[in-house]
Amino acid sequence: MAKQDFYEVLNISKSASQAEIKKGYRKMAIKYHPDKNPGDKTAEENFKKAAEAYEILSDENKKARYDQYGHQAFDGPQGGGGFGGGGMNMDDIFSQFGDIFGGGGFGGFGGGGGQRQARVKGSNLRIRVKLTLEEIARGVEKKVKVRRKVQADGVTYKTCPTCNGSGQQMRITNTILGRMQTASTCSTCMGSGEIIHNKPNGSDSQGLIVTEETVTINIPEGVTEGVQLKVGGKGNDAPGKKSISGDLLVLIEEIPHETLKREGNNIHYDLYVNFSEAVLGTSKEVNTVTGKVKIKIDSGTQSGKILRLKGKGLPSIESYGTGDFLIHINVWTPKELNKEQRRFFEKMSDDENFTPSPNKSDKSFFEKVKDMFS
């Protein structure tokens, strides 16, 4: 089922400013807040959708990728960047976006919003994955070894004595307007409400150990250089029984091809033919990103001619079709001739058949470039 457009979720225009995006999210989140709609699963889903939309649109880099590639920039087989691949729940949303409402929660809806205990999330890990054009064309599954921190077996936690497990510290300040109460994240437990009670030997001060794990990354076809995918929950763990793991962020790098050049979803290839092949015509086998194809070169082919193989380029990451494979014909002129060859061409130099006589169908270089980019 197709995902709803993030701008529609927040009921804002695509030209909305960051202030308007924040306002739109706040409006939707208040409308569908679970404390205001107890037991309403539809409202809860809409609340999550609003949080997911805000996560993307409030980040300038993620917003730019979404505007260019749509949901597929984030919703590949491993999630790509939204909540879809991260396993986040309602507590995650309150933890990540509570500050937008001031003071770490909503408050005023059923008496529970402002007191929600934060769920500490572990730090993210970042890796680079290099792909060939052939892998980009097909999509690929990569297995990588990742060193990540996980909670050690046998670690135990107890209620934080500073905040009594609430994850927040309350402060009362006297002002000219009267006594004001503010809440901030507990400095002892960092909002988790728990501290280490017992940690096994070999673990660090947070009860974590470093382990190596093989992670499978499913990379969708058509990705581009610089695209970042997300594997949810494969970053570092955080301390605490209710904590959640960070994410593994995967930055895509494209390995330059020896003979092919990428331009968006199109692929360019320079094919060299000798003078005799251009005159008489021939057949050639060409390696594309999806396999070998056989092409026919007509007799009398001119250098600079472009053969277009429709749909033999790279697929669009947004599923908008597939690019083309463009073959640029280059007639190779011999640099050295033996006596017999030289006599032949000297004899042909005045032959009218060897005299250049382009017609209207023989486009100029600039016309070919214009056609190529149109």
Image (cartoon, rainbow, N blue to C red):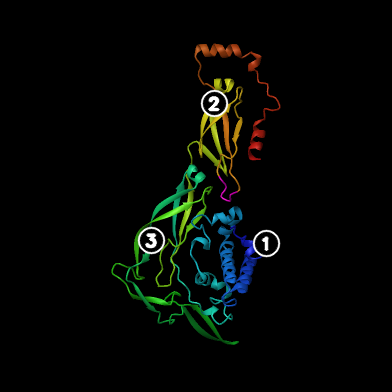
Q: Which of 322 and 348 is in front in this view?
A: 322
Local packing at callout 2 (Cα closer than 10 Å; few below 14, some 14-19, many 20+) is few
Q: In this view, does 237 lie above or below 113?
A: above
Residue 304 coordinates in the image, percent (x, y): 60, 29
Q: Name the residue under label 2.
A: 283
Which of the 4 image quarters holds residue 8?
bottom right
Residue 246 coordinates in the image, percent (x, y): 44, 64
Q: Which of marks 3 and 1 is nearer the N terminus?
A: 1
| Magenta stretch contains residue 304 | no
The residue at 46%/72% (across/down) is 119
Local packing at callout 1 (Cα closer than 10 Å; few below 14, some 14-19, many 20+) is few
Q: Which of 297 and 374 is in front in this view?
A: 297
> Which label was assigned to residue 148?
3
Residues at discs 2 and 1 in contact (Cβ within 8 Å): no
> Which label was assigned to residue 127?
none
How many numbered discs? 3
* Separation (CA) of disc 2 from disc 1: 53 Å
Q: Name the residue under label 1.
A: 13
